[in-house]
Amino acid sequence: MSDQNQIKKGEEFEKQAEKKLKGWAFFGSKHEDAADLYEKAANFYKLGKSWDQAGAVYVKLAECFLKLDSKHEAANAFADAGHCYKKTNTTECISRLEQSLDLFMEIGRLGMSARYCKEIAELYEQEKNLEKAMVYYDKAVDLYQGEEVNSTANQCRLKIAQYAAELEQYQKAIEIYEDIARQALNNNLLKYGVRGHLLNAGICQLCKGDVVAITNALDKYQDLDPTFAGSREYKLLAALAASVDEEDVDSFTDAIKEFDSITKLDAWKTTLLLRVKEMLKAKEMEEDDLT
């Protein structure tokens, strides 16, 4: 059956559903009957790849379930609507997933609520709306922690730290990276990630531009993980801290190049280190102006 024929079938079922809702129901419920027909309509729209029509029908299906006081089914229908709109209209998609999330919260399905919080956060990420993404990742963290799904909670926390640093909320990012490093030390599977988290925290410390705070942080990280002092990550941070202290742009650049030649720095680290370099350059120019 062609896409057009599938859509036509969907439209027929949708019309039948509307007719049911307008008529009288002597046996059973007209909302139940309409819900069955809307569900069929939505399936045909999906088969015909008419995502907007499918999304709109799932919203009508959710409204039928609300009339029947079937909140769980309504929440699922709003989520289905959101997933159809995901292909065509992000704003509409988020709006429907929020309705689903609210209903799941209302009926105490916290695992499902967490899942949709995370999905909404990811959609805001795609839209480059980092503030909103952080808000929903934050909600997801609370819900996942409540359900003791700590690994997913920490994945969301790392996203918050990443975006907090991008938005110059360095202290918030530092606290998350340090806390996750602390947790990872007690877990044999996660121990390997400790150096990376401490490196990220250290880079955020450099962005704050407080040399004393950077030195204190490096001492703290050695106490936290005695193996850290021998790592390339520690040596990089120590070299960068010394360059910041001496206001030496060249040695700062050399330390980054040396590290990057063995372990490629990702875009996030490069962006933040560039901010520190720009601060150093600005200080250098100030001093040149004074002399």
Image (spheres, rainbow, N blue to C red):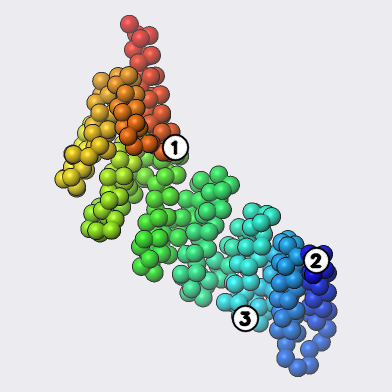
Question: In this figure, which residue is indicated by the disc labeled 3?
Answer: 69
Residue matched to label 2:
2
How far apart are labels 1 and 2 at the CA level? Answer: 45 Å
Label 3 element class: loop
Mark count: 3
Find residue 72 and report its image quarter.
bottom right
- Asked which quadrant contains residue 11, the reply is bottom right
Residue 67 position in % (x across, y down)? 67, 79
- Ranked by sequence position, the earlier of labels 1 and 2 is 2
Alpha-carbon neighbours of circle 2 within 10 Å: few (<14), some, or many (≥20)?
few
Distance in Å between CA atoms under marks 2 and 3: 37 Å
Determine the residue positioned at 56% across, 48% down.
Answer: 126
Q: Pinpoint residue 71: horizontal percent, then vertical percent.
A: 59, 77
Badge 1 or badge 3: first in the primary sequence: 3
Disc 1 marks which residue?
267
- The amino acid type of the residue labelled 2 equals Ser
The answer to whether residue 213 shows anywhere in this view is no
Q: Would you say the residues marked 2 and 3 are in contact, meaning their CB atoms lie under 8 Å apart?
A: no
